[in-house]
Amino acid sequence: MKIVVLKFGGTSVGSAERIKNVAKIVTSYLKKKFKVIVVSSAMGGETNRLINLSKEISSNFTSSEYDTLVAAGEQISCSLIAGRLNDQGHLSRSWLSWQIPILTTGNYSYSRIESIYKKNIINFLKKGGVPVIAGFQGINSENRVTTLGRGGSDASAIMIAKFFKAEKCVIYTDVDGVYTTDPNVVPKAKKIKKISYEEMLEMASLGAKVMQPNSIQDARLNRIDIEVRSSFKNKAGSLITKRKNISTKNIIRGVSFTKNDAKITLVGVKDRPGVAAKIFEPLFKNSINVDMVVQNISSYKKETDLTFTIKNEDLLKTEKLIKKNKKIIFKKLIIDERVSKVSIVGVGMITTPGVTYRMFNALAKKNINIQVISTSEIKISVLVERKNLKKAVDVLHKEFKLDY
Ligand code: ASP
Ligand code: MG
């Protein structure tokens, strides 16, 4: 059986018109003799509406009821899709996760798919049917509804593609692919034809909002090719695949950036073993994610300055935690919210010397000061003043020959 999983995001099922269009897309695959499994998200805005209702009811809504509530949006979109497919003469029906079932582990709101019972879906496919499966949801060992984290219908699609050994998993969304950088910032941004899972993970967690990062990790572990494309335009999208399938002609695949960082500096911290651990322990315990860290080497005074970045939304909490942390001594706390992180990403840098130099030199020529640096095997990030963000992205995009 030649199976394809087609996943539709919120805007792609956002209205009756859009849902009729989904049925057209499904039909085009059926014509090509694919067996189609549809996975859908809730209609755009619906999940947020449900979340807001829960907040009106209680500031401490029971987690199991919360998941039951927010998973409800997918029931609507799936039945509408199946209904339209029926209208167009196709055999189709909706499936909620408990009806399959799709079993998950982990906590409510952040569950992960563990297994999927395949028999009923396979039988339906064999009869020529199109199963329309609710994304984002599962059930746990207590038979309660669970959800997979915001944007989790991507993870549903990937895991369904894995369990049903699909030939392809296509993510239909409102952008027509993954770009070398945000086209709203750099009009010369290009669509990337092929990108590796690793690069996509770096781009996604760095701010290119195309897919849920967890689900890219699932795809990477299970070696599932993902095509990201628009349901609004009939244009080729981007393929997220293994490194092996991609040429490394381009050293850098893309330039990504964030706008919601804050920088914290502790001036005059004692330079002793264990100090950094004491600073970060309460942050970790409060689930605050520390991103970039830089510490100066100690001067003769045996004191040092420690700088790190966090997300803006964690700033107040972090400030409080540091101020009430009795285990650390420092002279001054400096906070700067006018910073942005700019990163270049590409597997090609592993084998190419001089990438760091080229990046820093390009920024220097534009008079952009680098505040903090962090690197991984396939990424170099720098923290710059937010007012320099666009200039920095522009110059790096050009330097690494990504402009079209
Ligand atoms: N409807 C869910 C959400 O809005 C899942 C998804 O969109 O993938 O987060
Ligand atoms: Mg969504």
Image (cartoon, rainbow, N blue to C red):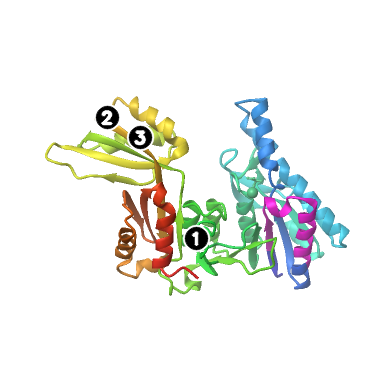
Q: Which residue is mark 1?
A: 186
Whether residue 21 appears in magenta in the rendering, the answer is yes
Given residues 306 and 285, the one toward you in this image is 306
**Residue 141 badge:** none
Q: Amino acid at mark 3?
A: Glu
Q: Which residue is mark 3?
A: 281
Image spot of residue 403 (x, y percent): 47, 68
Q: Is residue 120 visible?
A: no
In terms of sequence position, does the residue under pointer 1 or pointer 2 come before the other?
Answer: 1
Given residues 100 and 290, the one toward you in this image is 290
In terms of sequence position, does the residue under pointer 3 or pointer 1 come before the other?
Answer: 1
- Could you tell me which residue is drawn at 62 percent across and 53 percent down? 154
Q: Is residue 361 visible?
A: yes
Magenta range: 5-27
- Could you tell me which residue is drawn at 40 percent across and 57 percent down? 392
- In the image, residue 76 sits, relative to residue 323, either above or below, namely below
